Image: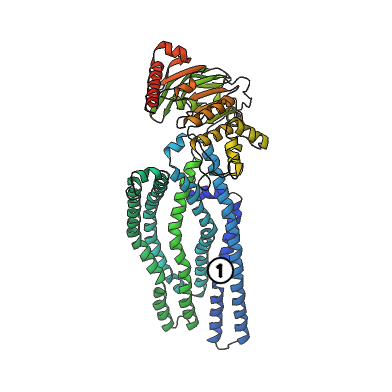
Amino acid sequence: MKKQNSFTYLFKIAGNSLWLLLFSGIFSVISGILDFVPFIMLYRVLLFLFGENPNADLAKQYALYAVIAIISKFLTAIISGALSHIGAFNTLYEIRCKLSAQIAKVHLGFFNSTTSGNLKKNLIEDTERIEKMLAHQVPDLFKAITVPLIMFIYLCTVNWQLALCLLIPIILGGVILSVGMKSSSNFMSWYQKLVGQLNSSIMQFINGMNVMKAFNVTAKGFKQYSDTVAEYHEMWVSCTKAQSGPYGTFMVLIESGIFFSFPIGGWLYLQDKIELPVYLFFMIMSVVFFSSLKSLQGFSMAIVQIMSGTDKIRQIMDVPQQEFGEITTDVSDNPAITFEEVSFAYEENDVLHEVSLEIPAKSLTAFVGVSGSGKTTTAQLIPRFWDNQSGVVKIAGSPINHYSEKALMNAVSFVFQESFMLHDTIWENIAVGKENATEEEIFASAKAAQIHETILALPAGYQTHLGEAGIKMSGGEKQRICIARAILKNSPILIFDEATSFTDMENERKIQLALNELLKDKTTIMIAHRLHTIVNADQICVFDSGKVIEQGTHPQLLAQNGRYAQMWQSYTAANMEVSAND
């Protein structure tokens, strides 16, 4: 299938707003035509003044026409601007809605191949640039192309020889400008890449400010940032050097357009081939005509930018979405999970190798192993954060890709190691777990998560804002808010990713109390580093190099005297050493 060009794709996204943009362009053209009507009226007046029978009444009539044209020009320009802005904002809304919906439906692998800085640029800068083009430059582009053409046709009816003179600088400038546009596209690709890198490095520098300060690293000393800034500077210097010649020459030709018609017009007048009013009219119209063309110079760079930004947006929209099935059944009665010879790889890196295991319904299964052994990836396959390359993952006896997206998301809750907080109130952070949750449900979830009293002790209580502009909570407190969120959701399957890894003793105790409430009648997978938290698990799966090498209860695995026994021995020895030092 033939790939749409950037403008076709953009106008397709615009949808119904395309008509608003079209009418905006039409009114812009009318405004542009009305812009040179007063000059035509002036020409008519000159004909009468230099004619044999001057007519004052007719001159007044032409002056009135000129005033009406000026007023109408402003009215049509206002209408054009209003229509283009409404159409542009509608399109901006559609693009952002479609982008966010698309990003929510792609595999996590997409986020490994692109940076948060690039995504920010796509969602904010590229879309804003498109809005500005649609709101301002589309109607102006209609006018910049159409009005000079109509003006040229009219001038041909006055005197075709002088009208043709106006084409000389246009042809020369057009050839030179096309050369500049070719190099612009190369620089724009470079620009798009560098802006994404710059956004990412700035965000990384800010997010890691505590580390930067600890090691006295300045923005200049942060190599990734300083290298990107240097390359960004190099790009603009190179771009300026490459573009200054073509664009400068184009502007000189357009600005000096009158010098082509002035001598030829003078010669025709001296030869009595044109009248003085015609000569004067062309001198005035040469300035007006070329002024209307000057805006095309700015459009060339803007068009390249918009095409590049639209291509970036289209690349995101073209990323394949996950396909879901039609099963909508609630799995609460039998939330058993089965892995049948499941293999998975991140691009070229094999992570899991034919993993097979049974996780009984309403049981507690622990995944343990060194970092990179595959335990977290295995858990992430259940809610389809990733899709395995081979083998089958089943819930309640059905492959997970046979479930609808809503059914699968309702079946699984995931409490991550890193507690994600919305930049919103504590209430909204908990309420994410269930749409239209009642006050009683929110409070009950918070109490079960051992965080209710802590929240009430805050001045604003549940309406306390979290995030950059709000209060800072400890890691354990944020983790308990996440647990409250999961309790509120009440999914039959719970995946708990090393949530107590970085908490102190008191917070760990409270989290364990919260977990006791959360894990009731749930199929639970707990990814653990602190082995004492999973000694009562129904089964423990030991991962190594993408395989389950041991499986059993805590006493059974100790009796086998294998990898788990070694891990337990090292873990208890380390804890004893820490206790002795304390």
Q: Position of residue 572 (x, y in %)?
A: 40, 21
Q: Position of residue 258 (x, y in %)?
A: 42, 74
Assign a secondary structure to mark 1: helix
Count every numbered label the image shows and give the total. Answer: 1
Between 179 and 352, the one lying in front of the other is 352
How many neighbours does mark 1 have within 10 angstroms: few (below 14), some (14-19), or many (20 or more)?
A: some
Q: Residue furthest top?
A: 559
Work out whether 82 lies above or below 500: below
Q: Amino acid at mark 1?
A: Ile
* 484 relative position to 315: left or right: right
Q: Quadrant of the C terminus?
A: top left
The image's colour scheme reads rainbow
Between 566 and 332, the one lying in front of the other is 566
Work out whether 363 lies above or below 1: above
- The answer to which quarter of the image holds residue 298 is bottom left
**Residue 375 seen by the camera:** yes
* 67 relative position to 268: left or right: right
- Which residue is at 46% across, 13% downward? 555
**Residue 383 seen by the camera:** no
What residue sits right under mark 1 in the picture?
33
Q: Position of residue 129 (x, y in %)?
A: 49, 54
Between 116 and 528, the one lying in front of the other is 528
Work out whether 360 lies above or below 409: above
Q: Position of residue 110 (x, y in %)?
A: 46, 37
Work out whether 356 lies above or below 105: above
- Which residue is at 42% across, 48% downward? 199
- Which residue is at 40% across, 62% downward? 174
